[in-house]
Amino acid sequence: MFGYRSALAAGIDSSKEAIEEPVRPGIISSRIVEHAFRQPYFLYVPRHGAINASVFVTVHGISRNAREHAESFASFAEHCGVVLVAPYFSQHDFPDYQRLGRKGKGARADLALDRIVTEVGRLTGAQTGKLFLFGYSGGAQFVHRYTLAHPQRVAKAVLGAPGWYTFPDPTVKYPKGIAQAKSLPGVTFDPSGFLAIPTCVLVGERDVRQDVALNKSPKIERQQGATRLERGGHWIAAMTRAAEVQGLKTSYTFHTLPRSRHSFTQSMRRGRMGEMVFDCLFGNKK
């Protein structure tokens, strides 16, 4: 159950009013989807309305700063005329959200996002068939794995400094590779689908520390490298090669963020991550 203290920490109104709060353009609102448990998220609708607008989803890392994501990207969403959704995946309900929520490790975060997006489409009239996704750190882990599992739902994706990746290797079991795993029932990874999704990786140029949040497994280091910078470059190269095998010329790009360590706030302020995210996702709308 989503607790009151967790809601306060995330800046979320967990009352019944949050569920029934009217959607007001130009205002960040907190909402809750009622399901097996109460699923919170933040919503921003541009001032001119949302009918047929694209949907931009931004996913927090393990600090679970969903409101900060919504506040940081609201002006970009307004400028580009897109609807912003920032889900909140609580530690209690989604301890494994970065890996979508494997069996026995909490609720499925990918299915929770689908429920949120369904409600957003009903409330706003936005186009929810293809999503424009961004995540930072643990949220970037979620975003690229959601893209691998549900490519039919994704238009483009931007990954902000994931700690580690699922590689397009069919001989290695998920989540290190894409071999089907019993821990994620009902999901089959289709390279011809997910390798067609344009994806950009952004990592701070100073994001080279092996901090406590970084997966330092020897197997991960052998497969992907020792730092977020190394791992991002190796993953982009692996995805590019895999796409070429499929006969695809998908855009996979890697950029560093100036003067930035592993910090969402610093990457937004110093590294101009917001501009880069929206340029990658909506460059033709600017």
Image (cartoon, grey):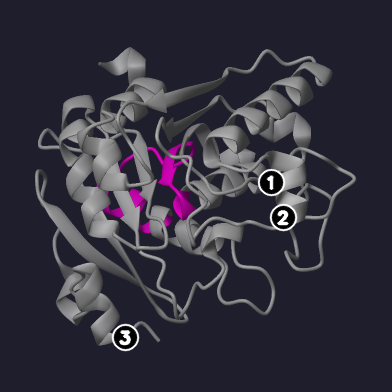
Q: Is residue 113 above or below residue 247?
A: below
Q: Pointer 3 and pointer 2: residues touching (CB < 8 Å)?
A: no
Horizontal and vertical percent for residue 110? 55, 58
Horizontal and vertical percent for residue 148? 66, 43
Taking the image as shown, residue 19 lies to the left or right of residue 25, namely right
Q: Pointer 1 and pointer 2: residues touching (CB < 8 Å)?
A: yes
Residue at point 67%, 34% (across, down): 194
Q: Earlier in the sequence, mark 3 or mark 2?
A: 3
Q: Which residue is mark 1?
A: 166
Quarter of the image for the C terminus: give it. top left
Magenta stretch: residue 185 in it?
Answer: no
Taking the image as shown, residue 230 lies to the left or right of residue 29, namely right
User: Which residue is at the front of the view, 174 or 132?
Assistant: 174
Q: Which mark is residue 3?
A: 3
At label 2, which amino acid type do we have? Answer: Pro
Taking the image as shown, residue 201 lies to the left or right of residue 62, namely right
- Separation of marks 1 and 3 at Cα, in angstroms: 31 Å
- Separation of marks 3 and 2 at Cα, in angstroms: 29 Å
User: Which residue is at the front of the view, 169 or 51?
Assistant: 169
Residue at point 20%, 43% (across, down): 72
What range is drawn magenta here? 118-139
Residue at point 26%, 28% (across, down): 272
Q: Most extreme residue toward the right, as rendered?
A: 171
User: Which residue is at the front of the view, 252 or 250?
Assistant: 252
Horizontal and vertical percent for residue 34? 37, 75
Q: Which mark is residue 175?
A: 2
Q: Earlier in the sequence, mark 1 or mark 3?
A: 3
- Separation of marks 1 and 2 at Cα, in angstroms: 5 Å
Q: Is residue 23 visible?
A: no
Secondary structure state at the residue bearing disc 1: loop
Q: Earlier in the sequence, mark 1 or mark 2?
A: 1
